[in-house]
Image (cartoon, rainbow, N blue to C red):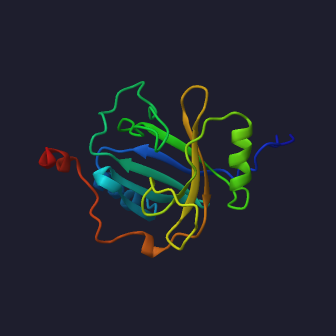
Amino acid sequence: MAQAKNTEFEFRGVNHLALVCRDMAKTVEFYRDILGMPLTKTIDLPGGMGQHYFFDCGNGDSLAFFWFPNSPDAVPGISSPAQLPRRGSFISAQGSMNHIAFDVSPEKFDEYVEKLRAKGIDISPVSNHDDSPTQVSETLNDRVFVRSVYFFDPDGVCLELAAWTRSLNASDVDPAQRPMTEADLHTAA
């Protein structure tokens, strides 16, 4: 059977799948300690917005989790963010799928952004992720680890084109950064 070929974009698979968790410490315990997925990137989001952690799920692919202090409890049917990043609330419910990131070549990233625009796709401002997913930087530096752009499919599923700009290493995980727990929500209130 001949394999279908995408003639528009050279997707290399899924860069990462980002979900929302209720308790980052329990999430780290389950994925790292029980399933054995290495924790490869930890991010404290700016302004107390939460945390974003990445786990290696094999073949260079990642499973990522957001922890938002104000995220709604999981509710069937609340499955995606209301707005694109940097345009409004990007929070989604616990246990929901926040977005799907398709891995693309860094060399093709700008071309693909222009291709989306040319097709009339409404996209977020282009971002070079640094220690803050909300920081927009047109210049790459040693701290930038992925370039990305977000957009919605016709059903409101949030999608991302993501291009790794460097390999992640041990310095990307801050050993002093404590994963937030469900109890932290109650002490902050």
Residue at x 35% of width, y 38% of height: 94
Residue at x 47% of width, y 63% of height: 130
In-front residue for pair 121/171: 121
Q: Position of residue 161 (x, y in %)?
A: 62, 48
- Where the N terminus falls, by quadrant? top right
- Where the C terminus falls, by quadrant? top left
- Number of numbered tags placed on the structure image: 0
Q: Position of residue 42 (x, y in %)?
A: 40, 62
Give residue 90's quadrant in the image: top left
| Left or right: 3 in relation to 134 | right
| Left or right: 127 in relation to 68 | right
| Left or right: 65 in relation to 150 | left
In-front residue for pair 131/178: 131
Q: Position of residue 188 (x, y in %)?
A: 15, 48
Residue at the extreme front of the image, as rendered = 138
Residue at x 58% of width, y 52% of height: 148
Residue at x 29% of width, y 66% of height: 177
Give residue 120's quadrant in the image: top right
Q: Position of residue 166 (x, y in %)?
A: 59, 69
Residue 143 vertical placement versus 153 (above, below) = below
Residue 67 vertical placement versus 81 (above, below) = below
In-front residue for pair 86/96: 86
| Left or right: 61 in relation to 46 | right
